[in-house]
Image (cartoon, rainbow, N blue to C red):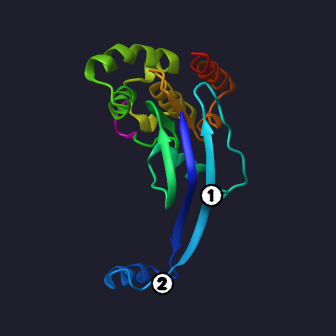
């Protein structure tokens, strides 16, 4: 379950770089910035088993909202209450390292999801199988195409069914076959 109440996010737009330093040196008494609100007064609930799509123009705050729900960005106002384990695909490659192999990145991704060594060892074959990257798993991520990168990221994020799955445009990358396969997995999660 997700409960969002009166959520807002404001960014500060400084006229020049030195203004940021000036604000800091003044003990935040001087405010040389313009406030730029990207979200204001957002409230909604998502009940177990529901799927919600967020639609809007570029710059409308969709990704910012998802980052706040996932916990990677703080809200300026309001609250987010989540029940359960969260897996998020926000920015392709977030948390992955180009010099490590697909397998090493999968292990680190699972660790970031809070899984222990035994769980990770048990899930690695399924991650590789779902991603269909068997011969690539021991290659550095820098050799992966964008679609292969997405396959690995999605497979890691969904290796164990999360209670809340947040996907921000990641499935728009790659081939139609894997997009369909991913949507089937998401439908199976919703049914469960």
Q: Is residue 188 above or below residue 171?
A: above
In the image, taking residue 9 as reference, residue 23 lies left or right, namely left
In this rendered view, identify the residue nearer to me: 12 or 153: 12
Question: Which numbered disc, 1 or 2, marks the residue that appears first in the sequence?
Answer: 2
Q: Position of residue 142 (x, y in %)?
A: 43, 39
> Measuring 45% from the left and 55% from the top, which residue is drawn there?
74
Q: Residue furthest left?
A: 117
In this rendered view, identify the residue nearer to me: 21 or 100: 21
Q: Position of residue 9 (x, y in %)?
A: 54, 61
Is 49 colored magenta in this rendering? no
The residue singled out by tag 1 in the image is 41
Q: Which quarter of the rendering shows the N terminus?
A: top right
Q: Is residue 17 above or below residue 66?
A: below
> Measuring 49% from the left and 37% from the top, which residue is drawn there?
88
Q: How many marks?
A: 2
Q: Which quarter of the rendering shows the C terminus?
A: top right
- 1 or 2: mark nearer the eye: 1
The residue singled out by tag 2 in the image is 32
Q: Which residues are magenta?
A: 96-101
In the image, taking residue 54 as reference, residue 79 lies left or right, namely left
């Amino acid at each position: 379950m997700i409960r969002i109440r009166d959520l807002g996010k404001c960014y500060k737009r400084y006229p020049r770089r030195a203004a940021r330093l000036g604000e800091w040196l003044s003990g935040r008494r001087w405010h040389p910035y313009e406030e730029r609100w990207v979200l204001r007064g957002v409230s909604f609930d998502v009940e177990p088993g529901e799927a919600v799509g967020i639609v809007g123009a570029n710059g409308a705050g969709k990704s910012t909202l998802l980052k706040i729900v996932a916990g990677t960005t703080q809200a300026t106002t309001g609250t987010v209450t989540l029940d359960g384990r969260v897996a998020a695909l926000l920015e392709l490659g977030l948390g992955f390292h180009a010099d490590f192999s697909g397998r090493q990145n999968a292990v680190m991704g699972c660790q970031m999801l809070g899984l222990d060594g035994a769980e990770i060892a048990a899930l690695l074959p399924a991650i590789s199988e779902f991603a269909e990257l068997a011969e690539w798993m021991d290659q550095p991520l820098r050799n992966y195409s964008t679609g292969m990168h997405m396959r690995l990221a999605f497979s890691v994020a969904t290796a164990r069914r999360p209670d809340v799955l947040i996907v921000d445009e990641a499935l728009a990358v790659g081939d139609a076959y894997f997009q369909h396969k991913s949507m089937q997995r998401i439908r199976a999660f919703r049914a469960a």
